[in-house]
Amino acid sequence: MTHQEIFGRVDHTILTPAATWEQVKAVCDQGRDLGAASVCVPPRFVKKASEYLGSSIKVTTVVGFPNGYSTPEVKVYETEDAIRNGADEIDMVVNLGLAKAGDWEGVLEEIKAVKASCKGRILKVIIEACLFEEREKIDLCRVVSMSGADFVKTSTGFSAGGATVEDVALFKEYISPDMRVKAAGGVRSFEQAQALIEAGADRIGASALAGLLESEQ
């Protein structure tokens, strides 16, 4: 794949807590002009980004981010608020404590509630893979597949580790055939992104690739 083709699968991301509108606007410009799949912005900036970009590129935002321990009701409200403000795609963090405790019914019900509130929009479920053993990851893939979500996502980028080829391959093996994988967290080169795509990732979350692509043009 060319670097441009890879970038077409990227959610060009800015989620730093101290981000200003000028920084978010610059990411929006880069994502639109370079042909990213979407721009991923903090909830606070969804409305402004959506109005600024119009229909030129999809706007993604995050729910229950980055720790995942909000109540289901709060995650549903966040989702509904994001959609009212113009979000096209939602990346939610699962309740990591429920998953660690093996409360798969609780995890499933929460994801299903958020998916229902998406009203047909794409939902990506972040499972923070670095915090789980292989058996737990397999169980999470099974539960996310049952939920009706569209993607399972490796990482927030705010925990102890990010996307790995091994996790992407594992997810691809155990999710349902109609689900996809998003690899995010620490993706800083096109070579790394290519390896993740070859392992089975359909979408990449990254902030560094736009600058690399610009430097080539």
Image (cartoon, rainbow, N blue to C red):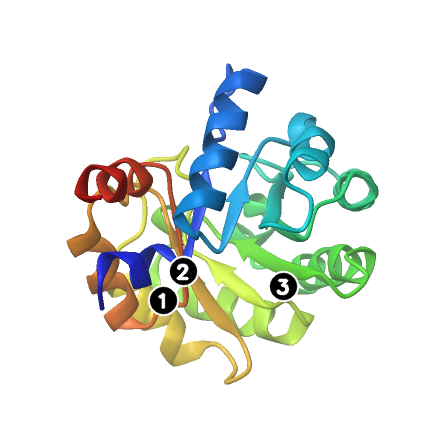
SS at badge 2: loop
x and y percentages locating residue 191 in the rendered image: 15, 55
Residue drawn at 33 percent across, 72 percent down? 200
Classify mark 1: helix, strand or loop. Answer: loop
- Asked if disc 1 and disc 2 are in contact, CB closer than 8 Å, the reply is yes
Is residue 103 visible in this depiction of the protein? no
Q: Do the residues labelled 1 and 3 touch (CB within 8 Å)?
A: no
The earlier-in-sequence mark between 3 and 2 is 2
x 45%, y 38%: residue:
13
Reading the image, the residue beneath label 1 is: 201
Eye-nearest disc, 1 or 3: 1
Residue type highlighted by circle 2: Arg
Q: Which badge, 1 or 3, is on the more N-terminal residue? A: 3
Q: Is residue 97 left or right of 157 when viewed as pictured?
A: right
Under mark 3, the amino acid is Trp
**How packed is label 3: few (under 14 Cα within 10 Å), some, or many (20 or more)?**
some
Work out whether residue 108 or residue 135 is closer to the camera in this orientation and state it.
108
Q: In this view, does 206 lie above or below 132?
A: above
Locate residue 28, reporting x and y percent.
Answer: 52, 35
Question: What is the number of the mark on residue 9?
Answer: 2
Q: Is residue 184 left or right of residue 215?
A: right
Q: Which element carries disc 3, helix, strand or loop?
A: helix
Q: Which dot, 1 or 2, sits closer to the camera?
A: 2
Res 54 seen here:
yes
Q: Nearer the viewer, residue 66 or 69?
A: 66
Instruction: Give the residue pinned by disc 3.
Output: 104
Answer with left or right where residue 60 lies relative to residue 187: right
Which of the two discs, 3 and 2, sits closer to the camera?
2
Reply above or below: 64 against 104.
above
Using the numbered discs, state the Cα–Cα distance from disc 1 to disc 3 in whole angstroms. Answer: 24 Å
